Amino acid sequence: MAKGTLIPIGGNEDKGNTQNEQYTLEYVQDGILSRVVKESGGPEALIIVIPTASSIPVEVGENYLSAFDKLGCTNVHVMDIRKKEDSELAENIALIKKADCIMFSGGNQSKITKKIGHTTIHKILIDRYENDHLVIAGTSAGAMCMSKEMITGGSSTESFIKGAVGMGEGMDFISNLIIDSHFIKRGRFGRLAEAVAKFPKHFGIGLAEDTGLVIKNGHTFEVIGSGMVILFDPTKLKHNNESVLKEGTPMSLVNLKTHVLANGDRFNFKKMKIKVLPLEASFV
């Protein structure tokens, strides 16, 4: 049972030159960032922002410094990892070892796995998440990289067509989820459905913008933020023809259970139970 906390967030661009996540400044609304700070231990917590996924890491780092500053945080650092060797630097390793929270920015999730995956920093993050009270948060790409099987890209328009999703190896902080972001606004139902069809032992999590999860113990989550979380539960699938289809062919999935969850709703993967409760309610 993991002692740490994961907080994947669906993303919410506030400004930027294009619609491509790599070039936009991800801005997470104050309510979600406030929860990140609270879970990390309060305004004095050591928070490390890692903008590796972004193509404008300096600007994104400054954006988060400003956002956390507005929340009264006094110990926030940007770790600008641009190449894999940066994940082996002694000063970066030292910060990761004592951080209370790691915050991954949006952009291209494959940059995170390429430059941090299978490095000393990655090993420390996994160990501390399992054995310490470390918070690992991430928005958009920073959320999608958390799973073992990671969506790397794919078409949103060719819904439920085989080949609409690209998959790769994620950071494997949690192994039984596949996470997608900007889910409602960008119409990513089809590609998450295909991802779940490829890996039917994994739950699909579609995060709307300004919406996230607080995942405890590796198997219980609470919805936070203003939007919705779409949960695809494939445990009772009766028909899945993904493995026999040619690319470009429409897929059929029978009995793919779908839940639409909102702020305060909770799900326990271990007990397979959903509870619609206020945020203050307890959940074991």
Image: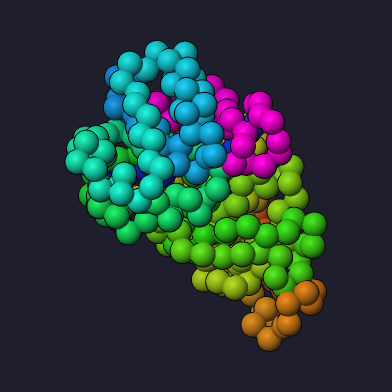
Q: Is residue 263 visible?
A: no
Residue 17 lies in magenta, yes or no? Answer: yes
**Residue located 48% across and 34% down the image:** 57
Viewer-side residue, 272 vs 63: 63
Viewer-side residue, 121 vs 38: 121
**Residue located 47% across and 28% down the image:** 58
Q: Classify residue 28 as left or right of residue 194.
A: left
Question: What is the span of residues highlighted in magenta in the rendered image?
Answer: 14-37
Q: Is residue 88 visible?
A: yes
Which colour style is shown?
rainbow
**Position in image of residue 182 (x %, y %):** 66, 43
Q: Classify residue 159 as left or right of residue 224.
A: right
Q: Quadrant of the N terminus?
A: bottom left
Q: Classify residue 265 as left or right of residue 33.
A: right
**Position in image of residue 166 (x %, y %):** 61, 64
The count of marks equals 0
Q: Quadrant of residue 262?
A: top right
**Position in image of residue 248 (x %, y %):** 78, 74
Q: Classify residue 162 as left or right of residue 42.
A: right
Q: Quadrant of residue 257?
A: bottom right
Residue 140 lies in magenta, yes or no? Answer: no
**Position in image of residue 127 (x %, y %):** 25, 52
Q: Would you place residue 241 above or below residue 19 in this image? A: below
**Residue located 51% across and 29% down the image:** 60
